[in-house]
Amino acid sequence: MVKSIYFHLQAYRKLPEDFTERERSVWVTASNATYCDPEEYGRGLNDSLSEYEYAAELGYDGLGINEHHENGYGGSPGPAMTAYLLARRTTKAAIVLMGQTLPTHQPLRAAEEMALVDCVSGGRLVAGMPTGTPMDTAVIAGLPPAQIRDRYREAHDLILEAWSRPGPFAFNGKYTKLRYVNPWPQPIQAPPPIWIAGGSSKETYEFAAEHNYMYSNLSLRGIDAAHKQLQQYWDTVERFGLDDNPYRAGMVLSVAIAETDAEAERLYAPHFPRFFQIAGHVTPGLSTPPGYMTKDTLRGVVKQIGTVSYYKPPIAPTWKSLVDSGTLIAGSPETVAERIVEIVKKLRVGHLVVSPQTATMPVELSRYNARLYAEKVMPRLRGLWDDTGYENHWWPEACGGTGAAAGAARAEKVIAE
């Protein structure tokens, strides 16, 4: 069954209209004192939490939470905190942590925080472990770009061991040395299913395939770019001798749904082009620091999009350009459902991370958009892969998957190595 995960960037909602003319980047350099009012930020976060809870009531399969720092369009610096709140306030939806960004976290603490979410939720955690953006890891956290992959792998191994081995034991890594690893608690799932979110990195495809994890594509450049990236991932899966189970892949989709195509444009055109313009407003000097990408990945990015950075589109996006490129799936429920069915089959994905909200969209309009997806689109997607006979090994058992059983075998492999 295709899973639909409600995703929310929890963006700051009150950036000025001329923000992109005044500032060179929405990430890192825009002054908090100038743009970020704490009370306004708090109201926005409370609205975001209420939208998450409404999505759970609507029957979304999961609630997706990401991690970014010093950022006007993605405001969740503490994803485990958000996940903890949602775990307490919901009963059925999977809690899908698209972060933690492992290189920037003390690994044992990250293991403990995710275990807490799994325990509070009754075993509903999906543990996302992204490498992280260069802005969050190299620029803000100050990590040497060339070390980030190495730090990531070590943190991943420590977390898997902390979740799977009886404690206490010692861990003697290159970057983390601990005499006692003995987290209280370990997660209910043994271990939770692990997702790797990423863009175009060859190393990320290989890491996901090597460990038999789920890979979720994060593309701001439309369906063609996502197709090229996912095809590279599927080629990697084949090279590692794995099956073509569609549940080992996912992707992020922005949706804008109304009763008719024309009504969708009328309602959402004031919001989505502005959102994508701001989300991509990151200067290449921050998004592509030397040493962050390997030569192979850099060649692949240039081949796919003709530039070194996925941010900063050359032309400001319009409603038409977003819809034509598939960056935004918009229209009536029939139009949107037909388009998504086409995408799911073409890209062979079993998880859809659905974003029906932007920073400037009023709460009621966001709820309307989310409700139409849940009531009129989601039912048409659920059974798309049922005839393949594949099971979803990357989804919690408490939510209808077989993730825990498959995860135990993967953890044993990591520890043995």
Image (cartoon, rainbow, N blue to C red):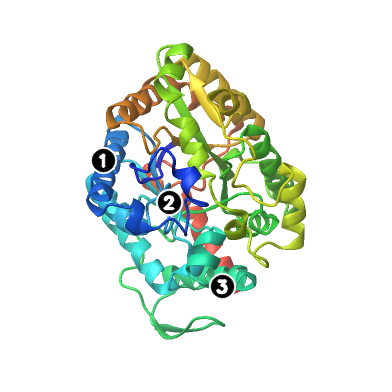
Residue plotted at (36% across, 28% down): 370
Where is mark 2, residue-wise?
A: 66
Q: Nearer the viewer, residue 278 or 265?
A: 278
Count residues near mark 3 (Cα–Cα under 10 Å), then give few for <14, some for 14-19, many for 20+. many
Mark-to-mark CA distance, 2 and 1: 16 Å
Amino acid of disc 1: Asp
* Residue 298, x across and y down, in percent: 73, 56
Q: Is disc 3 placed on a helix, strand or loop?
A: helix
Count residues near mark 1 (Cα–Cα under 10 Å), then give few for <14, some for 14-19, many for 20+. some
Where is mark 1, residue-wise?
A: 47
Decide: marks 2, 1 in contact (CB < 8 A)?
no
N-term mark: 3 or 1: 1
Q: Which quadrant is the C terminus positioned in?
A: bottom right
Q: Report if residue 34 is visible in the image.
A: yes
* Residue 218, x across and y down, in percent: 56, 45
Q: Is disc 2 placed on a helix, strand or loop?
A: loop
N-term mark: 2 or 3: 2
**Does residue 312 lie above or below 334 as drawn?**
below
Where is mark 3, residue-wise?
A: 151
* Residue 41, x across and y down, in percent: 28, 49
Left or right relative to 71: residue 386:
right
Residue plotted at (43% across, 21% down): 257
